Image (cartoon, rainbow, N blue to C red):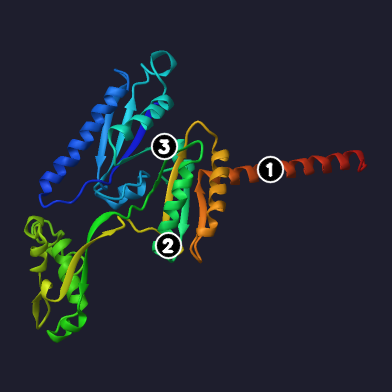
Amino acid sequence: EQVLKAKSTLYDIMLGNCENALVCEILRGFYSRINLLRALIPPGRVASVVNNIGLPISGINISYGNSGTIGTFDADMLVTLDETSGGSEGGPSTAALTRQLRERLPQDFPGVTFAFLPADIVSQILNFGSPAALDVQVASRDVAGGRAYANTLLARVRRVAGVADARIQEQARNPALRVDFDRALAGVVGLTEGDAAASLQATLSGSTQTAPTYWLDPRNGVSYPVSVQTPQYSIDTLGALNNLPITAARSEQLLGGLATIHPEPLSAVATDYNIAPTVNILATTQDRDLGGVTADIQGAIDATRADLPKGATVTVRGQAVTMAQAYQQLLVGLAFAIMLIYLLIVVNFQSWV
């Protein structure tokens, strides 16, 4: 009851040429959300606000976190409430504040998706690392068809009574650049796709993967990795990317002379389940039991099953599965206990009636 956790995802931020201006715009947006939170929550209730903007810097932090951040446009806002001034006497409860913020935040910040994540350790364990209590997975070999069906199903899920924070985890509007490489033309000058990929990776993300280099410190005998990368401000335009040199052992050519670069939207995160591309519809419950919401969501899935692409599957995961398994094990244990008691009575009284 003391910790309220919310996730804010910015889908309307466009990548610009000035990196500093983009960072300032992101920070300015999150600071405005913090000011609104402090205005909506009664004075004295907010003990602290911690913002984690973007992705964790380490893979270990990603594996331990369950917020589901997928890019630099995501952020976690961890709001800790003061337990001495909350509750029924000092102000509204955490559930009441969550309900109020769910209604107010989308109105004041259109184009931004807000989701209140489980902050207590019990809910996080029951979710098994998922950022929501309900996870509807649409797995399909047809990526476009699976996403179209997921959007249709999302509209039906949002109309289910008691569903809150319904959204698709894999956003498909992330700006990207597609490089169409002409292999025939590259073969004339003695270059391959591998040479282009190695040059692009070394320029955009460093040479750690393609050409690992280490420097041995003679003073302490420790080897340090050395990564060579082009500064981001040197390739801030499409023309600069076209002028990127592609080098090989006996040839060199500019990228723009062998490839065509054009922008296109791309999914910010790739999710696979049993090798099949998967789209996750995440949602939680509000003012209704999990079993009733799960039953209505299953009804929405059955109603839209005709629109499901061929070979695709829809599976409900999350706390709903844990709840169903717990009830099943409870009923099996109860039946076994009744049978055991009956057999003990039969043995003691030497009678079946």
* Residue 184 location, quadrant: bottom left
In percent of the image, x 85 and y 39: which residue is there? 345
Task: Tell me the tag on residue 145.
Answer: 2
Answer yes or no: is residue 312 visible.
yes
Q: Residue furthest bottom?
A: 188
Q: Which residue is mark 3?
A: 118
Q: Which residue is mark 1?
A: 331
Answer yes or no: is residue 1 visible.
no
Label 1 CA crowd tier, 10 Å (few <14, some 14–19, many 20+): few
Name the quarter where the N terminus is drawn.
top left
Front residue (pair 216, 317): 317
Q: Residue furthest top?
A: 89
Tell me which label, 1 or 2, sits earlier in the chain: 2
Tell me which label, 3 or 1, sits earlier in the chain: 3
- Amino acid type for the residue under numbered disc 2: Gly
Q: Position of residue 102 (x, y in %)?
A: 38, 32
Tell me which label, 3 or 2, sits earlier in the chain: 3
